Image (cartoon, rainbow, N blue to C red):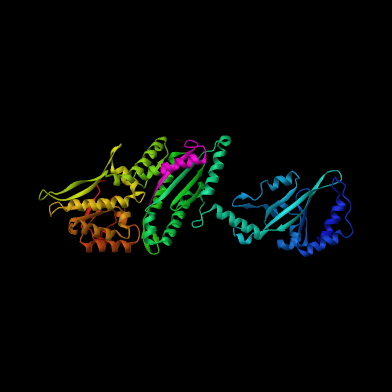
Amino acid sequence: MAFSLKNLASRNSTEGDSPVETPEPAPCSSAVLGEIEQVGIGLFWATDKNGEIIYLSEQAVAALGEESQSLIGRPFLETFSEATVDGERATARSLKLKMRSHAKIEDQVVQIKIGDRASEDEERNYWWSVTARPFFGPEGEFRGYRGVATDITRDFRHQQSIARQSQYDELTGLANRRRINHKLSATLQSFKSTGRSCALMMLDLDRFKQVNDTMGHPAGDELLKQVSERLLTIVGDRGEVGRLGGDEFQIFLPDIDDRGELGDLARRMIQMVSQPYSLAGRRAIIGTSVGIAIAPYDGIDGEELNAAVDLALYAAKEGGKGTFRFYSSELKDAASHGVLIEEGLRDALTRGELSLNYQPLVDPRENKVKSFEALMRWEHPEEGNISPGLFIPIAEQTDLIIKLGEWALRQACADAAAWPSQSRVAVNVSAKQFMTPDFCKLVASVLATSELPPSRLELEITESVFVGDDENVDKTFATLKKLGVRLSMDDFGTGYSSLGYLKRAPFDKIKIDQS
């Protein structure tokens, strides 16, 4: 059976006309349409009243790459499915609904579903833009559709690429902020009618910047990819994992509001993310903290819920990192107080509000003081004495910790220079300060200025300095030992507690944490 535009013209004239009086086509109409078909401008098609294909032009059959006999009689909606762009319909109204209601079809994008063409491989998929009108008989009875199609595969693939770039993170392939917020807003908008709840998790990586700075941006990018893979494994199909930028991740969990379930999920994330990573042959260990907010209890719109989960994450990090917190109304007041602390801390140095107290270390065998540990104190003009446990974590989240560390080093060495010659002074050094390129030069400069013998200065360093570039860490240790200062490991047992780096690093003393 041959199918051409002549067949279609004769079929239409024999099966009936539309309710509106339509004149018979001129004798040259079939020839003109045939010429159009040969040029390849249009791909013509028709269905019967049941939605089955009864006609495909020669160009359409060629474009589909199938024998016409295998296509005729097949339901149109089985051969052409409604196209989606990034999971959303390419057109507003459902194609199935239009055909069921015998409505006009205007520039409807459809995906070809023949053989193995419908594939997750984008290069094997094809799309048409179809336009059609319902065809009626003399009594007004519906007889099917008559339509034309245009192959828009190239343009549609480009549209998909643009849509993906606007919805997904280029580095990790995770959803970006825009996509997460879109899904969150859609779920929250439907809450009133459906009663749907949802949860939002926010996490960022502890010590990521240190890895990025010491091992290089390619290593940092690879680390983010590996973290993404771990989070996807944990979340599975329960929600969508997104990267907001930098080392911040957000997880949208629809229809989940059970705190027990969410807490278990957060614990697994913390445990999994904290496992060692292999980056270009080097080993890196990071951590993470998680904030959790639940709708509608913690917010009924996207802005409220995002603000709530931010506060919950902040509270988790303040609690010592490596933990999770649910949002509560008390966190809002605490966050406001934290902002005031940070603002005041920036001026504390210039206003002379910081001081050092010295805690003695006594040798029990001789009952003599051997050294003093410098402890920073802050006397706020309005708040009074502010605990280091409050302002030090705030300083560590910014570059303030570097300024505070330099001040403490200079002040402690100046004070110790006036003490008896046998007394040493111990100064805490943050990992962020330790990894600055000029740290060794700073120590040498401070010793020269204060005229304190290097052997009387002890630098207390935490295990977190070993996260990052081993080569730079070893060079810093070697330079400090050449200067003649003593090195002490602080809080051993609270971090990774690896005996391997204790063997490698030239520590003079190890302080085991009381916990």
Q: Quadrant of the N terminus?
A: bottom right
Q: Is residue 70 left or right of residue 347?
A: right
**Residue drawn 72% across the image and 54% down it:** 130
Q: Is residue 289 left or right of residue 108?
A: left
Q: Is residue 171 left or right of residue 381?
A: right
Q: Residue furthest left?
A: 366
Residue 345 vs residue 139, the one in the foreground = 345
- Measuring from the top left, give residue 14's x and y in whole percent: 87, 52
Q: Is residue 261 above or below residue 154?
A: above
Give the extent of the magenta segment.
287-313
**Residue drawn 29% across the image and 38% down it:** 381
Q: To which quarter of the image does residue 313 belong? A: top left
Using the rendered image of the protein, determine whether residue 490 is visible from the camera's viewpoint: no
- Measuring from the top left, give residue 105's x and y in whole percent: 73, 49
**Residue drawn 38% across the image and 44% down it:** 316
- Measuring from the top left, give residue 184's x and y in whole percent: 53, 43
- Measuring from the top left, give residue 51's x and y in whole percent: 75, 49
Residue 369 vs residue 492, the one in the foreground = 369
